[in-house]
Image (cartoon, grey):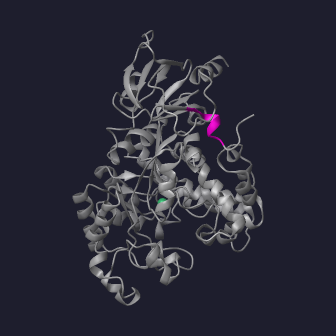
Amino acid sequence: MKFFSLVLALLFPVGVSASPASNEPAPRAIWITDVTIISPENLAHVDSGSVLVENGRIARVERKVGSRPPAGAIVVSGEGGFLIPGLIDSHVHLASVPGVTVEMNLNPEAAHAAMLAEYYQQLPRSYLYFGYTTLVDLAVVKREIVDDFRNAPLHPDLYDCGPSLPVANGYPMSFAPPPLRFQLFPNFLYDPAQISSIPAEYKPQDHTPAAAVAADKRVGASCVKTYFEHGFGKDRNLPVITLALAAGVRKAATQNGLVMMMHANSFEAQQFAVDADVDVIAHGMWNWGALDRQPPELPTEIKTLLDRILQKGTGYQATIQVMGGLRAYFDPDYLKAPAIPRVIPPALLAWFNSPEGKWFKKEIDADNTPDADMRQVFDRGPIRRVRQVVGYLASRNANFLFGTDTPSAPTYGNLPGLNGYLEMQQLHDAGLSLEQIFRAATINNAREFKLDSQVGSIEPGKIANLVLLRKSPLESVDAYDSIVAVWIHGRATPRDSLAVSPNK
Ligand SMILES: [Zn+2]
């Protein structure tokens, strides 16, 4: 195809290798020309034109053909292609390795340690491979993981919520054994009702909402993450955050300029989140409690709540792939997807395919129900419910924020980068328009996280985080898998060189 080869020839004109060295500076001026510019502030008038990138920033945007490049600029023809702002995933967990047990991740034996090290090394590139140039990590559990990510030669811009704010002994700190959980979640909220189950060395005054939010602010967080979750399985009666604690977090987050997020995936939890006036609900609603079995109409009580979410403009992360990622264990074709060896190193993929690597399937389905039946359990239950909710919100143009929750559980069904592409398909199937998906993954996220002076659109002054596609994302969702090249701070990388094993 003419366009494809032309672009690749021009992108790397002077023998630049496929994988640029870490300290190699971006060329000073790049003129990306003959390209359709798709940017959220200008969707009504999509035109062909040129974009000048200088010193890692967008210097000029010309929405007409035939403009001349400035003298000395490297010219890149994007003929036939579509230039979009780099994508933003505002819900990831970099420290969790998909498909791997918590113990294996925290304390791996030698053979596994090498496999995990390879995964972490590839991690930033896998996000870039699918066009994600900005990420928000919602709960920093190991500071060195985010530090390593930011120090990688090539990586998406990374923001984080610092250590998260679970209520003492609540989700998710409940998953760790009692003595360890207070170490792993040092920023927990002290509920005086639980005084007997909090070790004496932890003082209430260090774990007030104000103290917890201040601790996140001190480590440079952009947001704070809270939870409303009674739990599931054998841990389904966990303590939850109180309205008084949530009000304290709300006040302190506003004072510190931090985005308040809440893990909430049930009708009850999302009601609480709205009452607590959070900025962002970090999940779709797949648990309807007593209303679970009420198809096919969306129950009136739920519509009333969704109307409040719409009216308040609460940020909404649908995260449908949380369910898709569990369902993947019952889809015999999932691990055969050609994209998986692009984003996951061979040793880890081989382990996923081994009997040991399927341990989590047994956790989801202890009675060995046939795969087809399990797929139906998901499709008729939580996936149906979350789709109905998301479809209702889409038809009324909610403030969708693109977030995947990668990985949401120790599932191999949520792989970095690829999971974003799968989530986009889920959103489209649930009723979001292509324009809504595009806005959710660009300007909506940028605004919510107060990054819109830096990223989220193709406008002068912003960071040159750009993605060149062969297809238009306003025409099909699979355009997001037609990436030719990704610019991060003005530095171009052909997609193929971001893969673990390049396409032949
Ligand atoms: Zn999450």
Direction from residue 85 to residue 366 in the image, left or right: right
Q: Answer with the quarter of the image where residue 331 lies.
A: bottom right
Q: Which residues are magenta?
A: 493-499
Q: Answer with the quarter of the image where residue 275 lies.
A: bottom left
Residue farthest along the bottom direction in this orientation: 196
Between 306 and 213, the one lying in front of the other is 213
> Magenta stretch containing residue 498, yes or no?
yes
143, above or below 168, in the image? above
Direction from residue 339 to residue 74 in the image, left or right: left
Between 50 and 363, the one lying in front of the other is 50
Residue farthest along the front direction in this orientation: 23
Q: Residue 395: image x %, image y %?
A: 42, 43
39, above or below 501, in the image? above
483, above or below 387, in the image? above
Q: Answer with the quarter of the image where residue 58 lies.
A: top left
Query: Is residue 397 visible to us here?
Result: no
Between 224 and 375, the one lying in front of the other is 224
Q: Residue 388: image x %, image y %?
A: 49, 53
Residue at 43% x, 78% y is 182
Q: Residue 74: image x %, image y %?
A: 50, 19
83, above or below 281, in the image? above
Q: Residue 308: image x %, image y %?
A: 31, 55
Direction from residue 264 to residue 502 in the image, left or right: right
Quarter occupied by the N terminus: top right
Direction from residue 98 to residue 189 in the image, left or right: left
Quarter occupied by the C terminus: top right
> Magenta stretch containing residue 150, yes or no?
no
